[in-house]
Amino acid sequence: MDTSSPPPATRTFDNPPDYSFPHHRLNRVLRNPEKQPIVLVACGSFSPVTYLHLRMFEMAVDYVRQNTDFEIVGGYLSPVSDMYKKPGLLSAEHRVTMCNLAAEQTSHWLMVDPWEAFQSYQRTAVVLDHFDYEINTVLGGVQTADGEHRNVHVMLLAGSDLISTMSEPGVWSEEDLDHILGRYGCFIIERAGSDMDQATDNLARWRHNIYLVSQLIQNDVSSTKVRLFLRRGLSVRYLLPSPVVDYIERNGLYQDEGPNVTNTNYSKQLQNKDVEKVKAESS
């Protein structure tokens, strides 16, 4: 793993008002001093957060334990800023709240960092630099049971749909790709319909820093499908954590959304009252 090119020493980070970096679940003492400590960061809209978003972390945990010399000391959801302007993007306040409900009430180790959400749009490379700064510079990293200091390596956690966009010419800058994949590296979770091998072939320069994780139980639940179900008055229970479903119902969220976000195939199926097929494909 290439960690030889640290972020510029002069980089500063503007924090949202009243911001404090969450670290209440960060494991500050390594269980195995022979392992390299890492933190997983998942960036995304999370509109809303689904069980698949949470499962990505658990799949990465299994992969790390069975195939690497890493030790995961923390995991973070980092919701994107409202300035991202993605169709179907609920306000940061709602999205951060739903992520917190999911993390705090369904997991014993996941956390939500609101830094990215409550300010102007930040590139993924900058977000990872922020985590590196907060964990290693501000908090001082972690230590072994004998008190030896260790820096924590930050790594991106994403679905294979993201790595597919990274392999498309002109979508990501070469500088950002080198920073994300070269300095930090990533765990890529297989998603239905994405060709991971083809995508990584185009990113061969950083292949040593890209870890591909297969889904042993296929799950293609997406926020887009969930929003479509909610607009149609269909149940989304057991697709999302119950506290998130309760929050959505309590606040009447996702009742109306622009037509440009509708998945065409799923919309047609619903219009044809082929609801059971849609539900089966989302399970």
Image: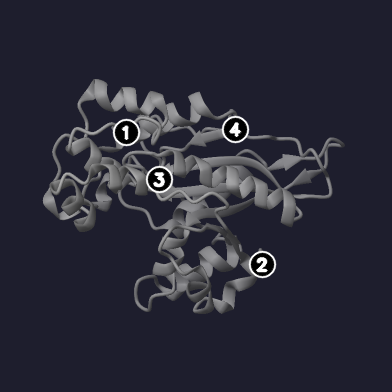
Q: Quadrant of residue 15?
A: top left
Q: What number is the disc on residue 14?
A: 3
The answer to whether residue 120 of the structure is visible from this angle is yes
Marks 1/3: CA distance?
Answer: 37 Å
Which residue is tagged 1? 236
Percent coordinates x, y for residue 128 in the rendering: 51, 53
- Circles 4 and 2: CB atoms closer than 8 Å: no
Percent coordinates x, y for residue 226 in the rendering: 29, 41
Mark 4 Cα shell of 10 Å, populated few (<14), some (14-19), many (≥20): some
The answer to whether residue 90 of the structure is visible from this angle is no
Marks 4/3: CA distance?
Answer: 26 Å
Q: Say whether disc 1 or disc 4 marks the residue closer to the N-terminus.
A: 4
Q: Nearer the viewer, residue 9 or 57?
A: 57
Q: Quadrant of residue 249?
A: top left
Percent coordinates x, y for residue 25 in the rendering: 60, 30
Q: Say whether disc 1 or disc 2 marks the residue closer to the N-terminus.
A: 2
Which residue is tagged 2? 2
Query: What is the three-letter code of the residue carrying label 4?
Result: Trp
